[in-house]
Structures are given as structure tokens and as C-alpha cells.
Amino acid sequence: MDDAFATLGLDHRLTLDDNVIETAWRELGRQLHPDGEGGDAERAAAVNQAHQVLRSSARRLRHWLELRDVEIGRQTVLDPGLMDLFSEISPALNDADEVLRKRSAASSALARALLAESEVTSQQKLQGLLGRIGKQRLAIVGRFPEIEIAAEKDHYDEARAAVGQLGFLEKWESQVQERLMKFITG
């Protein structure tokens, strides 16, 4: 992949503000849009791909490491806090799926009403988990300045650990958000 930072005209920093990334993407997207004067479909696609990489903390960190030719292991060691969180996420997702399945099968207003308490309980559990996932993710992202400082001395152990952990957190966050949307959209 091309250098996503350079594609968007941004510094090679993990600590980029999300608004800076969005602004760079929107401005370049507007300039390069294929339907506009002077548009360039190929460059517009590269800008969109760079945006996708940089807006995800996990993908940004992975890309940042790849640009430095840092070997990233395939196995991630989860700290105990993440293991505890994982042990709660899987059952909560399964419970939500079961409630959603029952709701879909409910053929009467009475049957749906009887599921209301289960729906609320499941949604509350998912929302609580979403908050905890977000806190864990922000804690890791909050260490990006230290990761950048360590990289100046060619120390990448924390970055390697963080990339895998962020990947799990973003995956779990997406799964929980998906279930919550299913409750909303029916």
C-alpha cells in the first residue's frame, strides 16, 4: 500500500487528530472527485483508501509500523483486562442474537411486548460493553505519544502489542454496534 499519511498530506504521526484526517480527506476528495473539473479517479480512490487506513487507530498504527519496516507478529497477547472484556462480549452478543431471533419470529403484538424486557436488558448490556470497549481503546490510543517516543529509539514492543489489541477492540466495537443497530432498525 502507498503511504497513507503522504497521500493525505499529513505528518507521519500516530497522534493525528481525527478532525485533521477528515478535513484532509474531504478537501482532497473534493479536488480529485472524478465528476469535477480536473478530477482524477485513481488518485481519488487512493485518497479514500488512505482515509480508511488513518481513521482506524488499529490500521493507522499497523500502517505506521509497516512504513518503518517493523515486523508485526500474527499472535496478539491480550492483557487480563481485555480477556475479561472478551469473556463478557461473546455471551452478550449471543444473548442479543437470541433476543433478535425471537423478536423476528414473534407474530403478534403480544409476543413482541413480552420480549420488551429482554430487549431492553440486552441493549443496556451492549451499551455498557460499548462504553468499556471505548475506554480500553482510548487508553491505548492515549499511549500513542509514548509509542512515538519509544520508536525514536527503535523500541517497538508496546506498539506491536497495541496494534493487535486495538484490532480486537475495533472488531468487538463493530460487532456490538451492529447488534445495537439491529435492535433499532428491527
Image (spheres, rainbow, N blue to C red):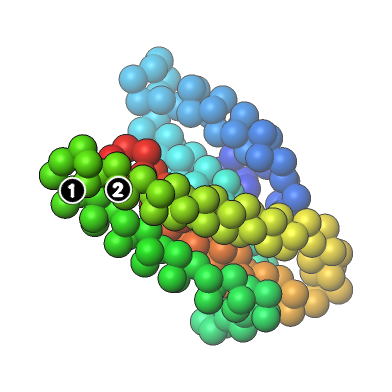
The correct choice, above or below, for 183 with respect to 118 in the image is above
How many residues crowd around disc 1 within 10 Å: few (fewer than 14), some, or many (20 or more)?
some
Query: In percent of the image, x 69 and y 56: which residue is there?
Result: 135
Residue type at mark 1: give it: Ala
Identify residue for label 2: 114
Q: Where is residue 81 in the image (x, y as percent from the top left)?
A: 68, 75
1 and 2 marks in contact (CB < 8 Å): yes
Which circle's residue, 1 or 2, is located before the other in the chain?
A: 1
Asked if residue 53 shows in the view, the reply is no
Query: Which element carries disc 1, helix, strand or loop?
Result: loop
- Look at discs 1 and 2 and give the one toward the viewer: 2
Query: Which element carries disc 2, helix, strand or loop?
Result: helix
Identify residue for label 1: 106
Query: In percent of the image, x 32 and y 37: which residue is there?
Result: 185
- Left or right, 67 with reference to 88: right
Q: In which quarter of the image is the C terminus?
A: top left
Q: Where is residue 9 in the image (x, y as percent from the top left)?
A: 64, 39
Q: In which quarter of the image is residue 48?
A: top left
Residue type at mark 2: give it: Leu
Query: In percent of the image, x 82 and y 58: which residue is there?
Result: 145
Q: In which quarter of the image is residue 16?
A: top right
Q: Position of residue 50 (x, y in %)?
A: 52, 46
How many residues crowd around disc 2 within 10 Å: few (fewer than 14), some, or many (20 or more)?
few
